[in-house]
Amino acid sequence: MAHSNISIFVPHAGCPHNCAFCDQRTITSTEKPPRAADVERICTAALGEVRDPADTEIAFFGGSFTAVPRRYMLELLEAAQPFIGEGRFSGIRISTRPDYIDEEILDILKAHHVTAIELGAQSMSDEVLEANERGHSAKDAAYAAMLIKSRRCFQLGLQMMVGLYKSTPQEERRSWRRIAALSPDTVRIYPVVILEGTRLGELYKSGEYQPFDFDTAVELCAGFLADAEQRGIEVIKLGLHASRDVEAKKLGGFYHPAFRELCEGRLYLRQMVKELTAAGGGKLPKSAVIAVPPKHMSRAAGHKRCNAEYLRTLGTQVRFIPREGAEHFEIEQVENAD
Ligand code: SF4
């Protein structure tokens, strides 16, 4: 499993689609498609900088890698070849659309040392995919995932967006179950951020599109995170990468610079409420002392101490104490109401 990526963004290059949520230029913060010389320059610089090249992949992100003109795709792949192998990077990671994967493309990717393929599934509801002008079906995503897995030489990644136009919390849960059932090695979960200059932005401004509330998005994503952990699926991203461009162009949706932290905190809260109720003999105690591994202190207390505050509104005053070696968290002491 690679632990870091040398990211090379291929913005919108050759993409014939216009997905309702996409403003690729804002998200990648670059407008000029990279050429072979750029790949060589970036890889040469990175070889001297990364701690463990053998644990690092060259990553072509940001667009629809296998949908760009074939000649251009090969130019980028070939430019990366001298940087892969003994003493250099471990392979190449790409992200693409499900409808641009077939046996021939997989042959090319394999021959060029691509080791991980991420598919933008986004939703497994055809109605949601269509409403967001995605241009492919849920079946396309399932078929492409099956083709990739059957090769046994690629790591499969799936990307999902939460809160798209026409989606509902029930639909998100259904989509997640179908995505998880495809047994990806990794997932990226992106709660929708509505950007100025996109079709979603227009629908949002006209009032036609009203995503569900922020707390529902956190609840849903926390649930997906917990389920992924149980199934052994690595969540490599949860929430859009914080960037000034996105912050400047966002109109609505679920942007938060620490979205994953919110979800991790929510999972902690769920578990604490359950265990505190059990420790209080069926109801929440008046106060409690909870020992937490130091590295999990902020998760337990929640973002800006929101978990501690929430428990206080339920009538429980909690004090967290750091303890090296504590298992997740341990309820140290409780005092019940009279
Ligand atoms: S396919 Fe990808 S790059 Fe093209 S419009 Fe959709 S999200 Fe943007």
Image: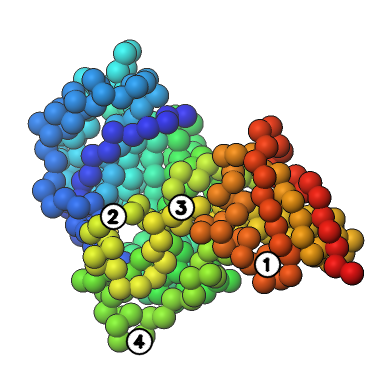
Q: Quadrant of residue 263?
A: bottom right
In the image, residue 93 lies at what x, y percent?
34, 36
Residue found at x 29% / y 68%: 250
Q: Is residue 8 left or right of residue 224?
A: left
Q: CA distance from mark 3 to mark 4?
A: 27 Å
Nearer the observer: mark 1 or 4; the answer is: 1
Whether tag 1 and tag 2 are in contact, CB under 8 A, the answer is: no
Q: Is residue 94 left or right of residue 218?
A: left
Mark 4 secondary-structure assignment? loop
Whether tag 3 and tag 4 are in contact, CB under 8 A, the answer is: no
Q: Nearer the viewer, residue 272 or 179?
A: 272
Quarter of the image with the C terminus in it: bottom right
Q: Earlier in the sequence, mark 1 or mark 4?
A: 4
Q: How many marks?
A: 4
Q: Is residue 180 in view from this perspective?
A: no
Question: Which mark, by number, is residue 243?
Answer: 2
In this figure, which residue is indicated by the disc labeled 4? 207
Residue found at x 61% / y 61%: 307
Q: CA distance from mark 3 to mark 1?
A: 28 Å
Nearer the observer: mark 3 or 2; the answer is: 2
Q: Nearer the viewer, residue 311 or 134?
A: 311
Q: Earlier in the sequence, mark 3 or mark 2?
A: 3
- Asked if residue 204 is positioned above or below residue 65 in the image, the reply reads below
Q: Earlier in the sequence, mark 3 or mark 4?
A: 4
In the image, residue 157 lies at what x, y percent?
44, 44
Whether tag 2 and tag 4 are in contact, CB under 8 A, the answer is: no
In this figure, which residue is indicated by the disc labeled 3? 238
- Residue type pointed to by label 1: Arg
Q: Is residue 143 left or right of residue 332?
A: left
Q: Nearer the viewer, residue 279 or 255?
A: 279
Q: Earlier in the sequence, mark 3 or mark 1?
A: 3
- Residue type pointed to by label 4: Gly
